[in-house]
Amino acid sequence: MLPNRFSITQKAEERLKREKAVTGLSTNIASRLLFWRSIERGEKVEVTHNIEPGKMHLEKTVWLGESQTATETILLNKYPGRTPDEHAILFALHVESGLSN
């Protein structure tokens, strides 16, 4: 459902790199935690065309790990009828949303 390679937003990527320097938690693991934090809060994000993608393009399996099936199912159910690229953007926006307190 999600493309095989995608990135998170530049804003989230920069913040996660700073957090990694402090905590040692890798960017992909932190992005999973932030995605789920956003989902648990019940947040709904919208795709806009002014999203600045990050430079770090990783494989879907690296971004999602063992939570791949659950993550893709949540995105399909929460945002039906979207393209794989739109779902990748929605994942990235949920990661960014999870960064806000």
Image (cartoon, grey):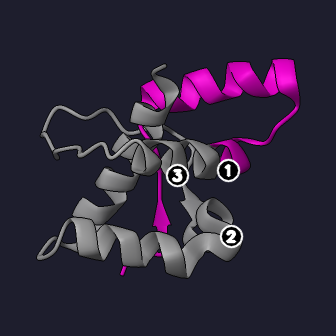
Image quadrant where residue 82 sits:
bottom left
**Amino acid type, callout 3:** Trp
**Amino acid type, callout 1:** Asn
Circle 3 sits in a helix, a strand or a loop, which is it? helix
Circle 2 sits in a helix, a strand or a loop, which is it? helix
Residue 84 visible in image? no
Q: Earlier in the sequence, mark 1 or mark 2?
A: 1
Rendering coords of residue 71 (x, y %): 48, 69
Rendering coords of residue 85 (x, y %): 27, 65
Q: Earlier in the sequence, mark 1 or mark 3?
A: 1
Residue 65: which numbered mark, if any?
A: 2
The residue singled out by tag 1 in the image is 28
Rendering coords of residue 31 (x, y %): 59, 45
Disc 3 from disc 2: Cα separation: 13 Å
Which residue is at a point 45% across and 22% down the rendered structure image? Answer: 100
Image quadrant where residue 64 sits:
bottom right
Q: Is residue 34 left or right of residue 79?
A: right
The residue singled out by tag 3 in the image is 36
Identify which residue, 14 or 40, lies in the foreground. 40
Image quadrant where residue 10 sits:
top left
| Overall secondary structure of the magenta section | helix
Crowdedness near tag 3: few (<14), some (14–19) or many (≥20) residues, C-alpha within 10 Å: some
Residue 66: which numbered mark, if any?
A: none
Circle 1 sits in a helix, a strand or a loop, which is it? helix
Disc 1 from disc 2: Cα separation: 9 Å
The magenta span reads 1-30
Crowdedness near tag 2: few (<14), some (14–19) or many (≥20) residues, C-alpha within 10 Å: some
Which residue is at a point 42% across and 75% down the rendered structure image? Answer: 72
Q: Is residue 66 left or right of residue 6?
A: right
Q: Is residue 76 magenta?
A: no
Disc 1 from disc 3: Cα separation: 13 Å
**Amino acid type, callout 2:** Gly
